[in-house]
Image (cartoon, rainbow, N blue to C red):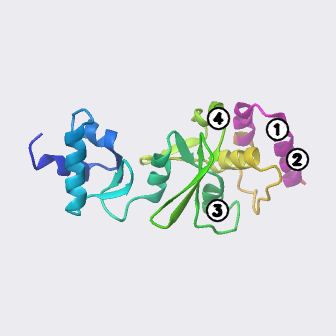
Amino acid sequence: MKKGEYLDSILRSRKSIFSTADIALLWQEQSSAATRVRLHYYVKQNKLIRVRKGLYAKSVDYDKLELATRIFTPSYVSFETVLATKGIIFQYSTQITVASYLSRDATVRDQIYRYKKIKDVVLMNHLGVFQDGVTAIASKERAVLDTLYNANNYHFDNTRSLDWEKIFELLPMYRNKSLTKRVQKLFQDEST
Protein backbone atom coordinates (compact mmCIF):
# COMPACT_ATOMS: atom_id res chain seq x y z
CA MET A 1 0.00 0.00 0.00
CA LYS A 2 1.06 3.53 -0.65
CA LYS A 3 1.38 6.07 2.13
CA GLY A 4 -2.02 7.79 1.68
CA GLU A 5 -3.95 4.54 1.18
CA TYR A 6 -3.67 3.22 4.73
CA LEU A 7 -6.18 5.59 6.32
CA ASP A 8 -8.41 5.55 3.22
CA SER A 9 -8.77 1.77 3.45
CA ILE A 10 -10.11 2.13 7.00
CA LEU A 11 -12.44 5.01 6.15
CA ARG A 12 -13.93 3.14 3.17
CA SER A 13 -14.80 0.09 5.28
CA ARG A 14 -18.41 -0.33 6.40
CA LYS A 15 -17.19 -1.14 9.91
CA SER A 16 -17.01 1.61 12.50
CA ILE A 17 -14.84 -0.33 15.01
CA PHE A 18 -11.51 -1.99 14.20
CA SER A 19 -9.11 -4.10 16.21
CA THR A 20 -5.39 -3.87 15.54
CA ALA A 21 -5.62 -7.29 13.87
CA ASP A 22 -8.50 -6.10 11.64
CA ILE A 23 -6.43 -3.16 10.49
CA ALA A 24 -3.36 -5.31 9.84
CA LEU A 25 -5.54 -7.59 7.66
CA LEU A 26 -7.00 -4.58 5.86
CA TRP A 27 -3.50 -3.27 5.22
CA GLN A 28 -2.37 -6.75 4.16
CA GLU A 29 0.47 -6.87 6.63
CA GLN A 30 1.19 -8.75 9.79
CA SER A 31 0.27 -7.00 13.02
CA SER A 32 3.57 -5.39 13.82
CA ALA A 33 5.26 -2.46 15.45
CA ALA A 34 4.85 -0.52 12.18
CA THR A 35 1.08 -1.04 12.32
CA ARG A 36 0.93 0.20 15.91
CA VAL A 37 3.12 3.22 15.12
CA ARG A 38 0.92 4.15 12.16
CA LEU A 39 -2.24 3.77 14.29
CA HIS A 40 -0.71 5.88 17.05
CA TYR A 41 0.04 8.58 14.48
CA TYR A 42 -3.56 8.56 13.16
CA VAL A 43 -4.91 8.83 16.70
CA LYS A 44 -2.54 11.70 17.49
CA GLN A 45 -3.67 13.46 14.28
CA ASN A 46 -7.37 12.92 15.30
CA LYS A 47 -8.01 10.83 12.21
CA LEU A 48 -8.88 7.75 14.28
CA ILE A 49 -10.16 7.39 17.83
CA ARG A 50 -8.76 4.85 20.27
CA VAL A 51 -11.87 3.68 22.13
CA ARG A 52 -10.18 0.96 24.15
CA LYS A 53 -6.84 -0.82 24.13
CA GLY A 54 -6.53 -2.46 20.72
CA LEU A 55 -9.82 -1.02 19.40
CA TYR A 56 -10.16 1.99 17.13
CA ALA A 57 -13.09 3.93 15.64
CA LYS A 58 -13.39 6.07 12.54
CA SER A 59 -15.24 8.79 14.48
CA VAL A 60 -16.96 9.52 17.79
CA ASP A 61 -20.21 8.46 16.09
CA TYR A 62 -19.20 4.79 16.07
CA ASP A 63 -21.84 2.09 16.41
CA LYS A 64 -22.10 1.25 20.12
CA LEU A 65 -23.65 -2.15 19.42
CA GLU A 66 -20.75 -2.98 17.12
CA LEU A 67 -18.31 -2.02 19.86
CA ALA A 68 -20.25 -4.18 22.32
CA THR A 69 -19.54 -7.28 20.24
CA ARG A 70 -15.88 -6.34 19.71
CA ILE A 71 -14.74 -5.78 23.31
CA PHE A 72 -15.04 -9.49 24.14
CA THR A 73 -15.44 -12.00 21.33
CA PRO A 74 -17.25 -14.20 20.62
CA SER A 75 -20.37 -12.33 21.72
CA TYR A 76 -23.72 -11.05 20.50
CA VAL A 77 -26.16 -8.37 21.65
CA SER A 78 -29.05 -9.92 23.61
CA PHE A 79 -30.97 -9.78 26.91
CA GLU A 80 -32.53 -6.45 27.93
CA THR A 81 -31.10 -4.52 24.98
CA VAL A 82 -32.99 -6.68 22.47
CA LEU A 83 -36.04 -7.16 24.71
CA ALA A 84 -36.51 -3.40 25.16
CA THR A 85 -36.05 -2.57 21.47
CA LYS A 86 -38.56 -5.28 20.48
CA GLY A 87 -41.16 -4.21 23.05
CA ILE A 88 -40.96 -7.36 25.20
CA ILE A 89 -40.01 -5.32 28.27
CA PHE A 90 -40.88 -1.70 28.90
CA GLN A 91 -38.09 -0.76 31.32
CA TYR A 92 -35.58 1.53 29.68
CA SER A 93 -31.91 0.99 30.37
CA THR A 94 -28.94 2.74 28.87
CA GLN A 95 -26.74 -0.32 29.44
CA ILE A 96 -26.01 -2.54 26.46
CA THR A 97 -26.33 -6.20 27.41
CA VAL A 98 -24.32 -8.83 25.59
CA ALA A 99 -24.08 -12.63 25.69
CA SER A 100 -20.46 -13.69 26.04
CA TYR A 101 -18.10 -16.32 27.42
CA LEU A 102 -17.66 -14.31 30.65
CA SER A 103 -19.58 -12.07 33.03
CA ARG A 104 -18.13 -8.60 33.26
CA ASP A 105 -18.97 -4.92 32.94
CA ALA A 106 -16.99 -2.55 30.74
CA THR A 107 -17.37 1.20 30.42
CA VAL A 108 -16.29 3.02 27.29
CA ARG A 109 -16.93 6.77 26.98
CA ASP A 110 -19.68 6.72 29.65
CA GLN A 111 -21.48 3.79 28.00
CA ILE A 112 -21.85 0.70 30.19
CA TYR A 113 -21.57 -2.68 28.47
CA ARG A 114 -22.80 -5.61 30.59
CA TYR A 115 -21.54 -9.02 29.52
CA LYS A 116 -23.45 -12.05 30.76
CA LYS A 117 -21.92 -15.49 30.61
CA ILE A 118 -23.69 -18.08 28.55
CA LYS A 119 -22.38 -21.59 28.03
CA ASP A 120 -20.22 -22.19 24.96
CA VAL A 121 -22.63 -24.62 23.28
CA VAL A 122 -25.21 -21.81 23.16
CA LEU A 123 -22.79 -18.95 22.49
CA MET A 124 -21.28 -20.67 19.46
CA ASN A 125 -24.65 -21.69 17.99
CA HIS A 126 -25.85 -19.08 15.48
CA LEU A 127 -29.52 -20.11 15.46
CA GLY A 128 -31.60 -17.05 16.27
CA VAL A 129 -28.62 -14.69 15.99
CA PHE A 130 -28.57 -12.34 13.02
CA GLN A 131 -25.87 -10.17 11.50
CA ASP A 132 -27.16 -6.61 11.45
CA GLY A 133 -24.47 -5.14 9.24
CA VAL A 134 -21.33 -6.01 11.19
CA THR A 135 -23.03 -6.69 14.54
CA ALA A 136 -24.43 -10.00 15.81
CA ILE A 137 -27.84 -9.46 17.44
CA ALA A 138 -30.17 -12.06 18.96
CA SER A 139 -33.75 -12.40 17.77
CA LYS A 140 -36.35 -11.50 20.40
CA GLU A 141 -37.06 -15.22 20.90
CA ARG A 142 -33.39 -16.00 21.50
CA ALA A 143 -33.11 -12.98 23.83
CA VAL A 144 -36.06 -14.32 25.87
CA LEU A 145 -34.36 -17.71 26.19
CA ASP A 146 -30.99 -16.14 27.06
CA THR A 147 -32.69 -14.05 29.74
CA LEU A 148 -34.58 -16.98 31.24
CA TYR A 149 -31.38 -19.04 31.15
CA ASN A 150 -29.60 -16.40 33.29
CA ALA A 151 -32.50 -15.27 35.49
CA ASN A 152 -34.98 -17.72 37.01
CA ASN A 153 -37.83 -15.30 37.73
CA TYR A 154 -37.71 -12.68 35.02
CA HIS A 155 -40.87 -10.72 34.21
CA PHE A 156 -41.66 -9.93 30.58
CA ASP A 157 -44.17 -7.12 30.01
CA ASN A 158 -45.40 -8.17 26.57
CA THR A 159 -45.02 -11.70 25.20
CA ARG A 160 -47.80 -11.49 22.59
CA SER A 161 -45.41 -10.77 19.72
CA LEU A 162 -43.21 -13.80 20.40
CA ASP A 163 -43.12 -16.66 17.93
CA TRP A 164 -43.49 -19.63 20.27
CA GLU A 165 -42.65 -22.07 17.50
CA LYS A 166 -39.21 -20.41 17.16
CA ILE A 167 -38.75 -20.46 20.95
CA PHE A 168 -39.44 -24.20 21.14
CA GLU A 169 -37.15 -24.73 18.14
CA LEU A 170 -34.26 -22.90 19.89
CA LEU A 171 -34.87 -24.37 23.37
CA PRO A 172 -33.03 -27.74 22.92
CA MET A 173 -29.66 -26.03 22.32
CA TYR A 174 -29.64 -24.84 25.97
CA ARG A 175 -29.77 -28.43 27.29
CA ASN A 176 -31.37 -27.23 30.51
CA LYS A 177 -34.40 -28.94 32.08
CA SER A 178 -35.29 -26.10 34.45
CA LEU A 179 -35.20 -23.63 31.54
CA THR A 180 -37.55 -25.92 29.60
CA LYS A 181 -39.98 -25.91 32.55
CA ARG A 182 -39.85 -22.10 32.84
CA VAL A 183 -40.51 -21.70 29.11
CA GLN A 184 -43.42 -24.15 29.22
CA LYS A 185 -44.94 -22.26 32.17
CA LEU A 186 -44.50 -18.93 30.38
CA PHE A 187 -46.15 -20.41 27.27
CA GLN A 188 -49.08 -21.76 29.32
CA ASP A 189 -49.50 -18.39 31.07
CA GLU A 190 -49.53 -16.66 27.66
CA SER A 191 -52.05 -19.14 26.24
CA THR A 192 -54.59 -18.62 29.05
Rendered location of residue 144, percent (x, y)? 71, 49
Residue ID for mark 2: 185
Q: Which residues are magenta?
A: 167-191
Measure the alpha-carbon separation of dots 4 and 2.
22 Å
Q: What is the three-letter code of the residue carrying label 4?
A: Val
Rendered location of residue 159, percent (x, y)? 76, 56
Around disc 4, counting alpha carbons within 10 Å, would you say few (fewer than 14), some (14 to 19), or many (20 or more)?
some
Residue at image x 84%, y 34%?
177
Query: Which of the image's four quarters has the C terminus?
Result: bottom right
Residue at image x 70%, y 67%?
90
On screen, residue 83 above or below 125: below
Q: Visible in this render: residue 47?
A: no
**Mostly what secondary structure, the magenta segment?**
helix
Q: Visible in this render: residue 33?
A: yes
Depth check, mark 4 against mark 2: the one in front is 4
Measure the alpha-carbon separation of dots 1 and 2.
9 Å
Q: Quadrant of residue 167?
A: top right
Please tell me the numbered disc located at residue 84. Answer: 3
Q: What is the three-letter code of the residue carrying label 2?
A: Lys
Please tell me the numbered disc located at residue 180. Answer: 1
The local secondary structure at tag 3 comes to helix
Return the disc, 4 or 2, that comes first in the chain's sequence: 4
The residue nearer to you, when weighing 65 against 38, is: 38
Q: What is the three-letter code of the residue carrying label 1?
A: Thr
The local secondary structure at tag 2 comes to helix
